[in-house]
Image (cartoon, rainbow, N blue to C red):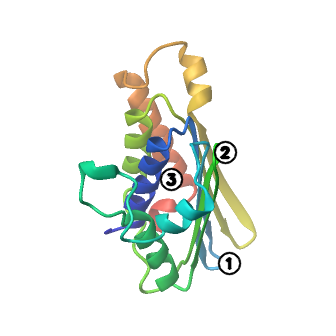
Amino acid sequence: MQDISLHLLDIIENSVRAGAKCIRVRIINDVQENILRFIIEDDGCGMDSETLLMAQDPFYTSKGERTKQVGLGIPLFKQNAELCNGSFTITSEPCLGTVLKADFEADNIDRLPLGNLKDTLLGSIIGHQDVDFYVNLISRDKGKEHSFHFDTEVIKEELGGIPLTYPDVIEYIEQSLIEGIQNTNMEDV
């Protein structure tokens, strides 16, 4: 993967395939601690302990016989985090969902760039209207914290049946994400 936002996209797609109806994405840039943290949580079908171990194996895929591709998304995300003096954990319970956490040493020379976070989130939200997305971006530096919260469930309620693919709605979501990313300084990560 060329950047971290592509890892994020892969994990979101895994959550959707697992039947998630709610996906929570938290990204924390803690300048003082020199940590860039990603937490992706879903309420999908979850995994038992054996499947959870296999999901971290680059030669395992849950996509069946329709493809001969292997599941490199989670193993590569883990590898990229660990190569940057970071860490990676994934926990899951059948019928309850999955939580993935990846920490990167923010200023590590080997850390991939964040990439186009706005397009990743916008594409996921618009592409999966039946899923509720909760996005929380947090930036901490010198005792100050800037945060951005975005919740599609609230937006859907306010729209009263107007689809998220309506052009004005897409524009609103895009502008909200742009402002949130700018206000938390995530574009500089």
Three-letter amino acid code at disc 3? Answer: Ile
Residue 80: quadrant of the picture = bottom left
Residue 119 screen position, x and y as percent: 37, 48
Position of residue 95 measured from the top left corner of the image (x, y, whole percent)? 64, 43
Answer with mark 2 or mark 1, whichever residue precedes in sequence: 1
Element on which disc 1 rests? loop
Residue wearing tag 1: 32
Gap in angstroms between the C-alphas marked 2 and 3: 30 Å
Q: Residue at x 56, y 53 (%)?
A: 183
In depth, the one of 4 and 186 nearer the eye is 4
Q: Please indicate, yes or no, whether residue 144 appears anywhere in the rendered image.
A: yes
Secondary structure found at label 3:
helix
Query: Where 155 sits versus 101, above or below?
Result: above
Residue 47 versus residue 29: which sits nearer the camera?
A: 47
Looking at the image, residue 39 sits to the left or right of residue 81; the answer is right
Location of mark 2 (residue): 96
Q: Which of the two labelled residues, at mark 1 and mark 3, occupies the earlier sequence position?
A: 1
In the image, what residue occupies the spot 61% across and 79% down? 34
Q: Residue at x 67, y 79 (%)?
A: 33
Secondary structure type for disc 2: loop
The amino acid marked with disc number 2 is Leu
Question: In the image, which is nearer the foreground, mark 2 or mark 1?
Answer: 2
Q: Is residue 40 above or below residue 125?
A: below
Q: Is residue 107 visible?
A: no
Task: Work out whether residue 62 or residue 33 is closer to the camera in this orientation and state it.
Answer: 62
